[in-house]
Image (cartoon, rainbow, N blue to C red):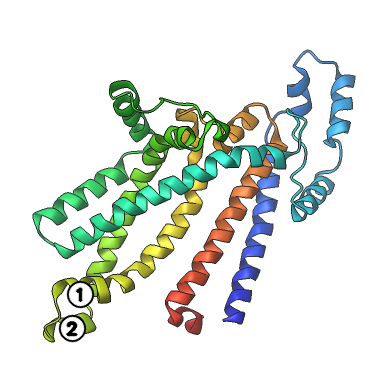
Amino acid sequence: MTAYLLNRLVIGFATLVVASIVVFSILEILPGDPARIMLGMNATEDAVQVVREQLGLNKPMLERYVDWSTGLLTFDLGRSYTYSVPVSELVAERAVVSLPLALMAMLLATAISIPVGIFAASRRGRIGDTLATGAAQVGLAIPNFWFALILIYVFSVWLRLVPAGGFPGWGAGVWPAIKSLLVPALALALSLAAVLTRVTRSALIEVLNEDYIRTARAKGMPRGTVLWRHALPNALIPVLTIVGLQFAFLLAGVIIIENVFYLPGLGRLVLQAITQRDLIVVEGVVMVLIAAVIVINFVVDVSYAIVDPRVRVRR
């Protein structure tokens, strides 16, 4: 188990290094001068050069990458060109919106998909299975921003149960804050629930065809006991992997939803930073999201190895 964990750690660190090189290089070759954008197009060349020197933009690219990557090791993401505050503070302020939103979306998706997947698998080939599979196919085909617009019309315009957008802040109370995130979380969850429903159904059907399941049925074991006690725990192993991977992508996928609902999260921060050519903020947020994906993948690998010892033995 120790060798397995060390192997995953090395792979994760190598991935983070390669990702930092790619992110830094791509953003550096983009056209546009942050200093000139900050001062305006009518600024003099001398003023632009002063700002470039203050921001460290006149240093060689390799030197700037070394300074930036060294700061990442100490959780120093640099200082925003536009806001003149540490990027880590901006990320911390916005993460209190994006992280709860992703968690709520994951909980809603899991609560919807696993029961529906079990229902479809236990009624394979029947009308219930057809309806559940068809609904999952529709959820996969429709983008989440379209779901967001429909949910805004239903819950905000028609029923007037929740606000159409904005975030009051956690200082206004837990319930008002959660209430403002419910509809965005549901919009994020529906597409994910479609994926998890199909995975749960397929995994459970595969397990139900195993020899030990047929043996349990031949011994006269009740159908419900076979399903819930013997088949479902083994079928949830691939579902666990997909849940972990999809949660990592939820953190990155909140960009569109946050802009639809005007939420002050990481998604809006990235969009504003791109518009203002605040590259240090874009680099910092992207690296935080990449690190989150790597950490979650590591946790999923460890959980997978704990649930199924064959994984760590084979690797």
Q: Looking at the picture, does residue 202 appear above or below residue 290? A: below
In the depicted view, which residue is nearer to us: 76 or 63?
76
Q: Residue furthest front?
A: 173
Residue 124, quarter of the rendered image: bottom left
Q: Secondary structure at mark 1?
A: helix
Q: Residue furthest top?
A: 42
Res 262 seen here: yes
Q: Amino acid at mark 2?
A: Ala
Left or right of 287: which side holds 224? Answer: left
- For the N terminus, the image quarter is bottom right
Of mark 2 and mark 1, the one earlier in the sequence is 2
Where residue 180 appears, as percent x and y from the top left, is: 44, 32
Left or right of 22: which side holds 156? Answer: left
At a point 73% along the width and 28% down the height, the residue shown is 83
Neighbor class of circle 1 (other Cα within 10 Å; few <14, some 14-19, many 20+) is few
* Residue tagged 1: 225
Left or right of 235: which side holds 303? Answer: right
Q: Looking at the picture, does residue 150 appear above or below residue 130? A: above
At a point 46% along the width and 59% down the height, the residue shown is 244
Left or right of 286: which side holds 54? Answer: right
In the depicted view, which residue is nearer to us: 281 or 105?
105
* Residue tagged 2: 216
At a point 79% along the width and 50% down the height, the residue shown is 71
Where residue 119 appears, as percent x and y from the top left, is: 19, 59
Q: Amino acid at mark 1?
A: Thr
Residue 120, quarter of the rendered image: bottom left
Q: Looking at the picture, does residue 228 appear above or below residue 73? A: below
